[in-house]
Image (tube, grey):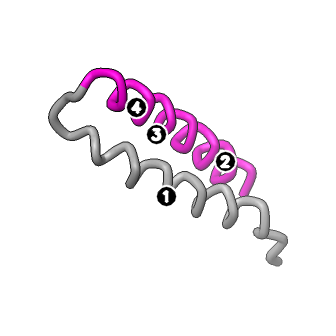
Amino acid sequence: MERTFVLGVVLTLAGLVGYGVGVSTPYPGRELSLVGIMVGITLAAVGLGGGGS
């Protein structure tokens, strides 16, 4: 599950950077950065809670 957490953190950070760039310079598809942030947070949460068997 560590890989899932790391992927979530990376995706969240990439989404935040994309959002920041999109605020200063509009570009096509910038709304996808919000999706990246949401999916990244979800993956990070799943990676943290994955104590499983």
User: Which residue is disc 2 drawn over?
Assistant: 3
Callout 4: SS: helix
Q: Are marks 2 and 4 in contact (CB under 8 Å)?
A: no
Task: Look at 78% across and 69% down and name the residue there.
Answer: 49
Q: Are marks 1 and 3 in contact (CB under 8 Å)?
A: yes
**Cα–Cα span, label 2 and label 3:** 18 Å
Numbered range of the magenta stretch: 1-25
Q: Where is residue 21? Give x, y as percent.
A: 38, 24
Callout 1: SS: helix
First in residue order: circle 1 vs circle 2: 2
User: Which residue is disc 4 drawn over?
Assistant: 18
| Picture layout, residue 52 above or below residue 35 | below
**Cα–Cα span, label 1 and label 2:** 17 Å
User: Which label was assigned to residue 15?
Assistant: 3
- In this image, 51 relative to 14: left or right? right
Tell me the crowding category of disc 4: few under 14, some 14 to 19, or many 20 or more residues within 10 angstroms, Cα based.
many
First in residue order: circle 4 vs circle 1: 4
Task: Look at 23% across and 28% down and name the residue there.
Answer: 26
User: Type of residue at label 1?
Assistant: Met
User: Type of residue at label 2?
Assistant: Arg
User: Which residue is disc 1 drawn over?
Assistant: 38
Callout 3: SS: helix
**Cα–Cα span, label 1 and label 3:** 9 Å
